[in-house]
Amino acid sequence: MGKKTLELNFLDENDKSLRFSIANPKEGINKAQLVGIEDYIVKNEMFVGPSGKLKGFGTAKYREVTETDLLA
C-alpha cells in the first residue's frame, strides 16, 4: 500500500532548510497554488527556520512510499 506526502522545503535567510511533510495531499497541486502557499507563509512569518526568517522554497515535491508487510 502506498503512502503519499507533499514535502515543502523552505530556505531561511542563511540558506538552512526547514521541511514540512503533509500526509495525503490532494492530487494536482500546481505551481501557482504552491507559490500562493509560499507567499502566505513567508509574508506572515508563520515559521522560523533553523537560522532565521524563511525566504522561500528550496523544493516542493510529492513523495510516495510503498510498504509491504513481510509478516502478513
Image: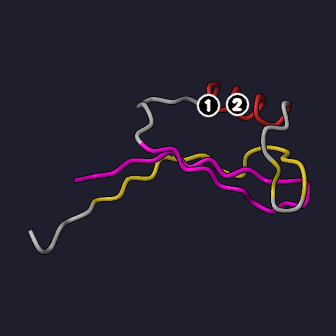
Q: Secondary structure at mark 1?
A: helix
Dot 2, crowdedness within 10 Å: few (<14), some or many (≥20)? few
Please name the amino acid that badge 2 sits on.
Val
Give the left or right position of residue 38, taking residue 62 as reference.
right
- The residue that mark 1 highlights is 31
Considering only vertical position in the picture, is 20 above or below 25? below
Residue 19 part of the magenta-drawn span: yes
Q: Are marks 1 and 2 in contact (CB under 8 Å)?
A: yes
Residue 34: where, in percent of width, then height?
Answer: 64, 32
Is residue 69 on the magenta stretch?
no
Query: Which residue lies most toward the left here?
Result: 72
Q: Residue at x 72, y 52 (%)?
A: 58
| Image location (x, y in percent) of residue 66 | 28, 59
Q: Which residues make up the magenta segment?
A: 1-23
Q: Residue 39: which quarter of the image? A: top right
The image shows residue 32, relative to residue 18, as above or below, that is: above
Residue drawn 65% across the image and 55% down it: 19
What residue is shown with label 2? Answer: 35
Task: Please give left or right for residue 25 compared with residue 59 in the image.
Answer: left
- Between 27 and 67, the residue placed more toward the observer is 67
Q: Residue at x 61, y 31 (%)?
A: 31
Query: Colour mode?
Result: secondary structure
Residue 14 numbered tag: none
Q: Which x, y percent locates residue 25?
A: 45, 36
Q: Work out which quarter of the rendered image holds the C terminus and state it.
A: bottom left
